[in-house]
Amino acid sequence: MANLYTNPNLSEGAPADVDLPSTKVPPKSKPIITDVSVNGVQISEQNILAEAQNHPAENPGQAVQAAARALVVRELLLQQAKSLNIQAAPEQMNDGSETPEDAAIRELIEQEVDIPSASTDECQRYYENNKARFSSEPIYEASHILFAAGADQHTARSIAKARAHDVIKLLQDKPEAFADLALEYSACPSKETGGNLGQLTKGSTVTEFEKALQSMQAGQMTGEPVETKFGYHIIFLNRKIEGNTLPFEHVEETIRAWLEAASWSKAVSQYITILAGSAEIKGIDLLGSDSPLVQ
């Protein structure tokens, strides 16, 4: 009888020191997550792995855990909807029609969870405390002369700084020569247009250059060279366009929507916590999780 676990063409007469290829079937890999259930209703590993695709994470294990929590929460809500005999017709959504289960969960939350409306006073308070969110950034129109030197070129940086000081002295006596001196001395391609950098906003240049712009008034030149990783700059601020703050009336409804969305998430999380506290959940620590119950 032929040996079913080796190749007979290799085994007969093969030298003793030759390693024959193994034909044993490798053991089945261990499941990533098992025995997840809600009040005796099992959530399959297959469903959890499919759901994990909707939960980006640093590693597959975290995605699987997030998926298991999401399916446990879904099952909790479905069971609660069933116990209250809640049914709802699916609605047409932007990404397709609701499933009957999704419709039941939506109706359950609408009936069971009280979401307070945000008052005008609350919206006004949020506006006053977060005005930066409703303001446009200032715009700077600036020119510069760059004396280039690498960050690790100590001798070159000393020379560049000294040259920048000399040119600043020239410009203090003859400021109208900025464009000509930029063409003569600047290591930046902008020298062809008198050092003009056009319009700059927050983040469009390096931090040191940006801080210098913020401290300047239109028509002003830096009295000292501004050091950056590129070398030393002489900056002239041609124009500054101040940012505008939108009036409260223009953003009140947007703020109200933000506040009510935050209230919705908090209230639904609390509701799920109550349901989880009275349920028998196996395979996942829903209440002890650091992740939010509502995503």
Image (tube, rainbow, N blue to C red):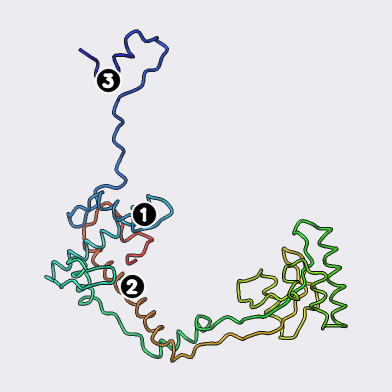
Q: Which label belongs to residue 265?
A: 2
Q: Quadrant of the C terminus?
A: bottom left
Tag 3 or tag 2, which sits nearer the N-term?
Answer: 3
Label 3 residue SS = loop
Residue type, numbered disc 1: Ala
Which of the two residues, 264 or 237, is positioned nearer the viewer here? Answer: 237
- Quick check: 175 left or right of 63? right
Label 1 residue SS = helix
Residue type, numbered disc 2: Ser
Quarter assignment of residue 54: bottom left
Image height check: is 4 above or below 26? above
CA separation in Å, label 1 and label 2:
21 Å
- Neighbourhood count class around disc 1 (C-alpha, 10 Å): few under 14, some 14–19, many 20 upward: many
Horizontal and vertical percent position of residue 7: 30, 17
Q: Quadrant of the N terminus?
A: top left
Tag 2 or tag 1, which sits nearer the N-term?
Answer: 1
Contact (Cβ within 8 Å) of mark 2 with mark 3? no
Horizontal and vertical percent position of residue 136: 55, 82
Which of the two residues, 129 or 216, is positioned nearer the viewer here? Answer: 216
CA separation in Å, label 1 and label 3:
39 Å
Contact (Cβ within 8 Å) of mark 1 with mark 3? no
Q: Which residue is mark 3?
A: 5
Q: Which residue is mark 1?
A: 63
CA separation in Å, label 2 and label 3:
59 Å
Residue that appears at 36% across and 81% down: 257
Residue that appears at 17% across and 55% down: 41
- Neighbourhood count class around disc 3 (C-alpha, 10 Å): few under 14, some 14–19, many 20 upward: few
Instruction: Please identify the residue farthest to the top as the structure is shown.
Output: 13
Residue that appears at 17% across and 67% down: 100
